[in-house]
Amino acid sequence: MSAGVAYVHIPFCARRCPYCDFRISVGREEARDRYVASVVAEIEREADWLPLAAVYFGGGTPSYLGAGGLEKILAALERRFGIAAGAEISLEANPEDWSAALVQALAAAGFTRVSLGAQSLDPSVLRTLGRVHTPEQVPAAVDLARKAGFRSVNLDLIFGTPGESPTSWERTVAKALAADSDHVSCYALTIEPGTEMFQRVAGSEAAPDPDDQADRYEAADRLLSAAGLNRYEVSNWARPGHECRYNQAVWAQGEYAAFGMAAHRFRDGVRGHNLQRLDAYLAAVEAGRSPFIATEKVTGWDREVERVFLGLRRAGGVRAGPAGEALVESAEGRRLVEAGVIALQGERIVVRRPLLTDAAARAVLALPPPDC
Ligand code: SF4
């Protein structure tokens, strides 16, 4: 690999959205300075690597940390590894935090891409999702990013929220395009155990309807494609040249360093994650201990299966190789080929019905090692 890639997890959020089951810390303002210092310390202790071509600050809500903390972490990455010329420096942000002062400070610090948690541009859907921003704040946030010089702007959207009509969803997608985003990510609302929405659905509220969600997905694909945003992964569409480089590296089974509470990493063939509770993470780093927990060394057949599993998410598919060939020769693989879900195109396997990507992925994971 000719460049490094890094992920930084910022776990803070102002409140918990009713559908969210991510590992986050609500409030905890008193811990923010300690957190920044701990992430910087972790970066300083990391093994040498190449200059970084892509950095992704995810969360949580990175923008909730403010410009100062994000700048300190980015500066630490630059001191430790260097930042390659033209690197993509990306962060997730909520529209309500995205002030002109914050945006200008982040652009000046070197951030080039923002992923805004728009979710919907319908006020009633935003209320159901417990989001506090207004639809009008979304195009205003895109505009601020453009004026500050951000190269790429993504809007995250959620489809299939109970109460969302087909017209509401199509208007949301149309408004996202009219806001001049050059990247859109669309995810089906899922009701996760332990969330407030799970309780509501266990009571009297309607659950998302999978058939409706399939219709919404197809509508999004049609509208986004017609506007010149190509689907390059199951849930991601972009104008040419605006695909997220960090995510592309991950789907290509590239290695990435990762810093911060609960951050997942893959370096030197080892996958793992950092301690998943804020106080445990801070205590470990402040005591000079590594917060990292290795979970698996990915080698041999497992690595080959993982390569195909990850690559099937990409619209361009993945080089078949031994696992891809085993897939199309397996009983389940033949069934998926006959049903038009997957196809062998030259040396590559491509998922032709993206809504069924999980079925193809399960078939890959079920493949026995070649000597069985
Ligand atoms: S802002 Fe994002 S990470 Fe934070 S609670 Fe809401 S969905 Fe979860």
Image: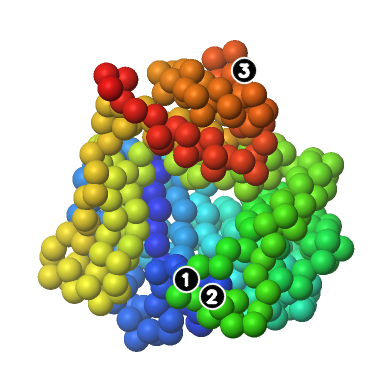
Query: Whole-percent x and y of residue 293?
Result: 21, 55
Q: Amino acid at mark 3?
A: Gln
Q: Picture quarter containing residue 262?
A: bottom left
Disc 3/disc 2 C-alpha distance (Å): 41 Å
Disc 1/disc 3 C-alpha distance (Å): 39 Å
Is residue 368 depicted above or below 125 in this figure? above
* Tags 1 and 2 touching, CB below 8 Å: yes
Residue 198: mark in rendering = 2
Query: Whole-percent x and y of residue 91?
Result: 52, 59
At mark 3, the secondary structure is strand
Q: Amino acid at mark 2?
A: Phe
* Tags 3 and 2 touching, CB below 8 Å: no
Q: Which residue is mark 3?
A: 345
Is residue 5 depicted above or below 342 in this figure? below
Query: Whole-percent x and y of residue 65?
Result: 45, 74
The residue that appears at 53% across and 35% down in the rendered structure is 360
Q: Residue farthest to the top?
A: 346
Q: Quadrant of the N terminus?
A: top left
Q: Residues within 10 Å of mark 3 (few under 14, many from 20)?
A: few
Does any portion of residue 150 appear in the rendered image?
no
At mark 2, the secondary structure is helix
Residue 193: mark in rendering = 1
The residue that appears at 74% across and 64% down in the rendered structure is 143
